[in-house]
Image (cartoon, rainbow, N blue to C red):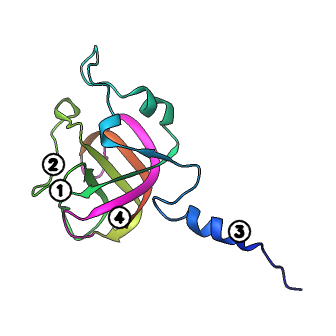
């Protein structure tokens, strides 16, 4: 017996797996990550706090990676010529998001514009493998050239 699925259902399933094309997924923008004038210094925007823990998309530029294949990279609002790693979240730039990929993958050339899909994670966190401290991350992420 052959089961036939409606074309709309199949196409919707394919599109839902592609970054930037997932229906029902919120699109973040770098200029909307933080409040402009937080009373306690840098504060997440209300939208970021509401979306924490949910799947989101964001488009930006892949910063120069530490190695050709990795399970993480830094996404920035503008192309960068150097890696923007910080010593603490106190120095955290407002225009970068750390991306933790679902799987180790070859990274594109530095400065490539990509759309990333992943689960938004907020708050100070130190990566147990690298010691890298981040304030804002996308976890279980995948990316595609934008």
Give percent across and percent down for residue 39. Answer: 28, 13
The mark that comes first in sequence, 4 or 3, is: 3
For residue 44, the mark is none
Assess whether residue 109 is covered by the magenta stretch: yes
Would you name the residue on which mark 2 appears? 84
Q: Give the SS element for disc 4.
A: loop
Which-is-in-front pick, marks 4 and 2?
A: 4
Which residue appears at 32% of the width and 30% of the height?
A: 34
Which residue, as the protein is rendered here, is positioned at the far left? 81
Q: Could you tell me which residue is drawn at 26 percent across and 19 percent down? A: 37
Q: Nearer the viewer, residue 25 or 40?
A: 25
Q: Quadrant of the N terminus?
A: bottom right
Point out the image quarter for the C terminus: bottom left
- Quadrant for residue 88, please give it: top left
Residue drawn at x 30%, y 48% is 98
Q: Give the range drawn in magenta.
A: 108-131
Q: Distance between the residues labelled 4 and 2?
A: 21 Å
| Residue occupied by mark 4 | 146
- Per the image, the residue denoted by label 3 is 8
Q: x%, y% of residue 57?
A: 44, 51
Q: How far apart are marks 4 and 1 (CA)?
A: 13 Å
Q: Marks 1 and 2: which is nearer the front?
A: 1
Real-space Cα separation, disc 3 to disc 2, in angstroms: 42 Å
Q: Earlier in the sequence, mark 4 or mark 2?
A: 2
């Amino acid at each position: 017996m052959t089961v036939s699925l409606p074309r709309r259902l199949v196409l919707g399933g394919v599109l839902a797996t592609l970054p930037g094309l997932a229906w029902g997924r919120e699109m973040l923008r770098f200029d909307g990550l933080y409040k402009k004038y937080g009373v306690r210094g840098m504060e997440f925007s209300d939208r970021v706090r509401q979306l924490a823990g949910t799947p989101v998309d964001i488009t930006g530029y892949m910063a120069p990676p530490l190695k050709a294949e990795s399970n993480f990279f830094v996404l920035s609002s503008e192309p960068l010529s150097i890696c923007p790693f910080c010593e603490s979240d106190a120095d955290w730039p407002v225009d970068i998001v750390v991306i933790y990929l679902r799987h180790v993958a070859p990274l594109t050339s530095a400065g490539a514009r990509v759309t990333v899909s992943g689960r938004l994670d907020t708050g100070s966190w130190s990566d147990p493998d690298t010691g890298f401290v981040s304030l804002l991350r996308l976890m279980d992420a995948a990316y595609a050239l934008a």
